[in-house]
Image: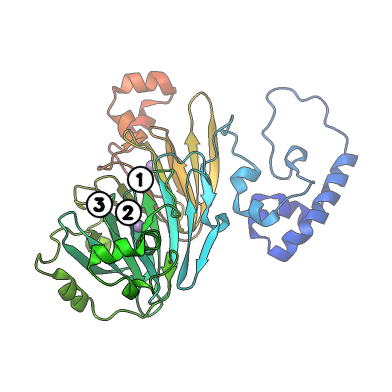
Amino acid sequence: MSDEKKDIFTRRGFLGTGSAALAAAGMLSAKVAAAQAQQPYPAKEEGPKPYPTKDSRSASAPGPGNQVLDEQNPDSFLPPQTDAGGVQTFKYPFGISHKRMQQGGWSREVTIREMAISKTIAGVDMRLTAGGIRELHWHTAAEWAFMLYGNARITGLDAEGKSFVTDITEGDLWYFPTGIPHSIQGLNPDGCEFLLVFDDGNFSEYETVLLTDWMAHTPHDVLAKNFGVSKQSLETLPKKEKFIFQAAVPGPVAADQKSTAGSLGLSPVDFAFRTTQQAVTKRTKGGEVRIVDSSNFKVSTTIAAAIVTVHPGGIRELHWHPNADEWQYYISGSGRMTVFATGGRARTMDFQAGDVGYIQKTLPHYVENTGTTDLKFLEMFKSNFYQDLALSEWLTHTPSQLVLAHLDIDKATLDAMPKDEVPVMPK
Ligand code: MN
Ligand code: MN
């Protein structure tokens, strides 16, 4: 094999090859396969068989393939030797979900229909232009949100009928409980994009109570009687739902707050959370974690979250969550995660910005930064509190003779392990 051909199949060469070279790789791989076919099979090997490497005959993939997808998923192209058995797929990229296009923005969702494993949480990625409105609505699931880009104004009405209006910027959160009506509108200079997280994997953005949809399906004489206005004055009501639509950018937030307060005054409930004003919960050499749950964001009674940064080469340590499934959203960087699914089964998958990951309650996992920039991702749980346990804290808070009898390591190695939870270990 020439060095050039060999380089394509080594990990570094494979990942570093440009798209033009990758396009040609289909032809090259056929040549490589032909060259390999002429080599005699090795004599019967003694001892344990080595695990295939990328440039070995056993790992070659001369048939049809998507080189760009393979490049993004090296742990699917050649799984680590420790992977085994059938593990339900726990990755879905927003990039291949259906985009619902409207004037004023769009939305796309990852629910149990896109990702069968995600029973407890569904997510929506939504874009609104400056002035673009996600119309007044509510739903049967509660909504937790993270602002990914830009600025928005959100409105809501609390259970006492009091108004809530505030402006949200990148990194901020909001939470609207089941049945609480709300709206979102993009602000200057370029609107917003945000992630919505619902506490039900079966949720769909297509099944929400919309103001315009409701009005379009109520007899106009009933509406006239309800509002004490003439039927003629309601003739211009929309004939069908608007969902997302373009409107003018609203004025100052203070003016909206003043006009909506009425005789009751504004809501004492804060449906928003300014993550940027919160102290980091845990910071290590390897990265940092911010935890947001009902202990510091009171209204968020069904979604707990961790906002995680892992520096290059670092790892979100081996751990598990006793209380809930984990729904992940990757914001930036690249990483890989292995989920150990019991009974000798394990699967490793690779993640990039815009991907969704999912881990069932109690299953062990880690997230490793495999790139050269910070890996940022969100962990969400259907729970009012965040909870995790780490392998290191388990092993160092168990009698050492008991641990040594299991792992066949020496005492010095055990003593060198972190004594307490270190959410993000450095390189
Ligand atoms: Mn909503
Ligand atoms: Mn986790």
Q: Left or right: 20 with respect to 169?
A: right
Q: Which image quadrant is residue 377 in?
A: bottom left
Identify the residue at horizontal 80%, vertical 24% (top origin).
Answer: 44
Q: Which image quadrant is residue 58 in?
A: top right
Real-space Cα distance between discs 3 and 2? Answer: 20 Å
| Label 1, residues with CA under 10 Å away: few <14, some 14-19, many ≥20 | many
Mark 3: which secondary structure? loop
Is the residue under label 1 in contact with that under label 3 (CB below 8 Å)?
no
Identify the residue at horizontal 23%, vertical 76% (top origin).
Answer: 253
Image region (quadrant) for ligand 1: bottom left
Q: Position of residue 247 (x, y in %)?
A: 39, 77
Identify the residue at horizontal 48%, vertical 26% (top origin).
Answer: 342
Q: Is residue 238 above or below residue 418?
A: below
Nearest to viewer (mark 3 / mark 2)? 2
Q: Position of residue 22 (x, y in %)?
A: 73, 59
Q: Earlier in the sequence, mark 2 or mark 1?
A: 2
Image disc number at residue 199: 1
| Residue at mark 2 | 144
Q: Nearer the viewer, residue 222 or 131?
A: 222
Can residue 36 be spotted in the picture?
Answer: yes
Can residue 285 be spotted in the picture?
Answer: no
Image disc number at residue 281: 3
Q: Identify which amino acid the numbered label 2 is placed on.
A: Trp
